[in-house]
Amino acid sequence: MPTAYAQKASPPASDDEPTTLATMTVTAQKREEAMQDVPITMTALPEQLLQDTGVRDIKDVQLLVPGLHVSSTTNEAQTTARIRGVGTNGDNAGLESAVGVVIDGVYRPRTGVGFGDLGQLERIEVLKGPQGTVFGKNTSAGVINVMTRRPSYSQIVEGEITVGNYGAMGVSGSYNDALGENAAFSIYAAKRKRDGFNEVNTGQGPRAEDEDGDQNFHSIRGQLLWEPTENLDINFIADYSSREENCCVGVTTVRGPTANIADALAGGAGMGIIPVADPERRLAYANRSTEQDMKDKGISAEVNWITPWMNGATFTSITASRDWQSINGLDLDFSGADVLYRRANYDDSSTAFKSFSQEFRLTGATDKIDWMVGAFYSDEDLERHDQYVFGEDYEAYIGAAALGSIARIVAQGVADGRYPAGSVVNTANPFGFVSAVTGLAPGTNYSGDAADDLYNQSAKSMSLFTNNTWHATDALDLTLGLRYTREEKELRSAYLNGPGNKGCQAVQGNVGGAVGALIGRGVPAAALLDPAVNPNVAQQLLGLLCVPWANFAFNGLTTNQDRTEKEWSGTLKAAYRWNDHVMTYVSGARGYKGGGFNLDRVQVAVAGAPLIPPPFIAPVEETSFPGEFVDSYELGAKTTWMDGNLLLNATLFHQQFTDFQLNSFLGTSYVVRSIPEVKSMGVDAEILWQTSMKGLMLQGGLTYADTRYGDDLLPDADLFLLPGNHISFAPLWSGSASATYEWDFGSEHIGRFNIGAKYLSEHNTGSDLDPQKIQGAYTLVNARVAVGAKNKRWMLEFWGQNLTDETYTQVGFDAPLQTGSWNAFLGAPRTYGMTLRMQY
């Protein structure tokens, strides 16, 4: 049976015709089925609920789904979705998401690529647990399945005007009509603007924008439905969206010892870093632009043909071509000092995807078996420009930071009795320290472009799949699904350093001079290579002067990598309907997420340095990581009460991930590690209640997810906290609830009220689990009240989001180059406004 087509002119349902929740249909197995008959843990969000709660993009959906967590980092393109605490950090385009995003049947290769105004929605389904059999390889944690509204054969004009605080303004409009008896079309367009949420201290510039987190985007989507016969329909979709915004600055949560250096370089106290960490102020520091420009466009065609074969089997074809790019400027030091940044140009700092996908399915049924077979192919080209530019203060900042760190190491060694009493490092003239150890003239060690790297990755994926349900008896269903995936990836990386990037090479080529400069500063000889200290003085100096973007050993390096994966995934389920009210099921599934390559500079200290010729810190040319697997088991019950108006569902789950792909920011670069084991176990519960009180609808859910790393020790010292602990972004408890009430105003008007809340217990927001990145428990509350005409001619809505104005961390991170300092990307503050909707 094809999925949710527009219907030719049909009489409207009678007002007296009963509607129940039990009749709600979903397409979780790519066929229309009653939600209560599908043995999958899922949340289905219908159009009216999405409108009542102000859902416009994937991030908004999380308020309605317990166990779903969506966060962003340095820009909105770096958006990551997690289910039951499991997801993939989005700061590296080489990693694919563990939570798949599918919009109108088309898979989006990364969560950020699917992030934007979704337009007119019909339904969103959030499926929990591995869904690789039906939806593909990169759905090891779940799927967000979005269905927009298809054209109908009625002439409908809709419009919306929104105003709100922070200067928010938005307009959207749509037109739907028939094109003769066999075709219909719709077109939707929207434009939205908003001022920034965060205040920015720009130091000495050149940044001029004193706000960040603003919004300025427009989008357009057109659909054409053609039904030449009763058994054939073809739906064409074309869409384009543009976002030109400033995002995202981080606020200081812990001010460390290097903050004084940033202040001095930026012009005085309070000019480089906030004097007292206070996230509630939403005051960030950035002297360089965070401009971002995202463009997303694509076309697709879905064909559904009820064939004359195999008892009317349905043949489905979905063809899509998409083009997405994101250009992102960034102040990389998150301070008012001019240390390190990225320019917002395509050839400097950008990520772009071009993808083509084709899916074929043949779906049918007999008296005993519902069957489906299919094939999927995708061809994806990725291009990433990764750039770092030295600011005017870089050399001075690095010198002062290195000298201060060395002084602290020596002072601790004296206190411990390892170094001679009275040893004191001379910290005078810290801004000239780099020249003293390299022997180069001041101002010539680091200037201009630091690094300008280019990554070109191609990925071709082909899979064959089948999903079949055998109705063994009237009560017992057995489902078997299998998918075979073959994937080929190739990566070419070209690394380049600018001509002003000389400091790292100079210090490694002048070891004697560097040692002399250190001893001249009062560093005891015993401290230079002290094995009892990690990092010791030599390591600390080299680590700061030869961070990845400054390491001369990358200059001119090109690498070619390739990998091929051939993997099976699948599921086996048994569902038993005890009576009209209760269905229970047990399922086992094996999920798979493809391996890939780290698109970042990775380096390692060479054993024996500095007793060998340079480089002492060498590039790592092999940056591949293997595929991620999950074995998942569920025991669930779906129950229906009160004549179909009350749904109570619950699932016990146990998931074990192997080679879990962790993307960690280690202060100077992102490093991908395959964690041997992650376990997630707990319970999902959900209630939907269309109460006996006319117009009152309740929806809620609760997830308890104990998601932990295995006990295996990891090679990175920065990740020593991981073994045995809860993974990041994985609250133990997560709950959501909403209530909607609709009532009549006389014979022609109605009112609607909705209030919703999402609760998350304490969790860590950093991949390395530093305690400074812990976010305490918090609750977000949204509400909307509306009055309008029963015939939907107009509706005026007053709304508020995050009504209690919670200040919470989306992602916590080590402040780059600022030992002892931590920053955070904050969630949105309280917003409110009103929306006028019109329909004719």
Image: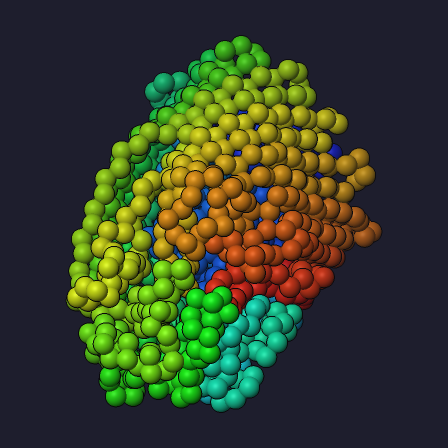
Write down the quadrant of residue 636 in the picture: top right
Identify the residue shown where x is 59% and y is 39%. 705
Q: Quadrant of the N terminus?
A: top left
Observer able to see residue 208: no
Report the label total.
0
Across and down, in percent, residue 417 comes to 47, 67
Q: Is residue 19 left or right of residue 625?
A: right
Across and down, in percent, residue 608 comes to 24, 59
| Above or below for 776 versus 736 | below
Identify the residue shown where x is 48% and y is 86%. 264
Q: Is residue 36 left or right of residue 361?
A: right
| Above or below for 825 versus 29 | below
Q: Quadrant of the C terminus?
A: bottom right
| Above or below for 789 versus 35 | below
Across and down, in percent, residue 7 comes to 51, 38
Write down the quadrant of residue 227 in the picture: top left
The answer to which of 588 and 291 lies nearer the viewer is 588
Q: Is residue 251 left or right of residue 387?
A: right
The answer to which of 663 and 546 lies nearer the viewer is 546
Identify the residue shown where x is 75% and y is 27%. 642
Q: How is the image coloured?
A: rainbow
Across and down, in percent, residue 352 comes to 32, 59
The answer to which of 51 and 157 lies nearer the viewer is 51
Identify the residue shown where x is 19% and y is 64%. 612
| Above or below for 163 versus 574 | below
Observer able to see residue 165: yes
The answer to which of 406 and 489 lies nearer the viewer is 406
